[in-house]
């Protein structure tokens, strides 16, 4: 068995029951958290 076969087996068995995330929504949330941390106004996007 090669190294790539040994590495691929566990990776192929990984599954999740979580629904996919929307990148745009997650980016807006991250910007809001960053604005809150830095104390700046959130002017780019509204969540």
Image (cartoon, rainbow, N blue to C red):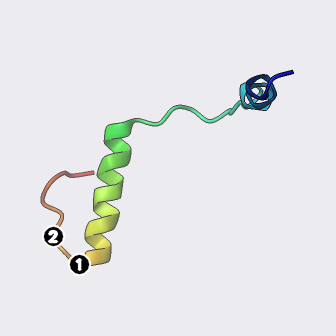
**Separation (CA) of disc 1 from disc 2:** 7 Å
- Mark 1 = which residue? 39
**Closer to the camera in the image, 39 or 15:** 15
Picture quadrant where residue 2 is located:
top right
Q: Does the CB distance between marks 1 and 2 fall below 8 Å?
A: no
Relative height, residue 3 to residue 46 (above, below)? above
| Figure quadrant of the N terminus | top right
Relative height, residue 5 to residue 30 (above, below)? above
Residue 23 coordinates in the image, percent (x, y): 37, 38
Q: Residue furthest right?
A: 1
Dot 1: element:
loop
Q: Residue furthest front?
A: 2
Residue 29 coordinates in the image, percent (x, y): 35, 54
Residue 46 coordinates in the image, percent (x, y): 21, 52
Residue at 23% across / 78% down in the picture?
39
Residue at 72% across / 31% down in the picture?
11
Q: Total of numbered circles in the picture?
A: 2
Which label is found at residue 16?
A: none
**Closer to the camera in the image, 34 or 9:** 9
Label 2 crowd (10 A; few <14 / some 14-19 / many >=20)? few
Residue 19 coordinates in the image, percent (x, y): 56, 32
Residue at 18% across / 51% down in the picture?
45
Dot 2: element:
loop
Picture quadrant where residue 10 is located:
top right
Picture quadrant where residue 30 is located:
bottom left
- Mark 2 = which residue? 41
Q: Residue furthest left?
A: 43
Label 1 crowd (10 A; few <14 / some 14-19 / many >=20)? few
Residue at 28% across / 51% down in the picture?
47
């Amino acid at each position: 068995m090669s190294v790539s076969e040994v590495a691929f087996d566990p990776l192929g068995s990984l599954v999740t029951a979580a629904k996919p995330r929307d990148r745009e929504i997650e980016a807006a949330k991250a910007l809001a958290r960053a604005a809150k941390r830095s104390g700046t106004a959130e002017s780019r996007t509204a969540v």
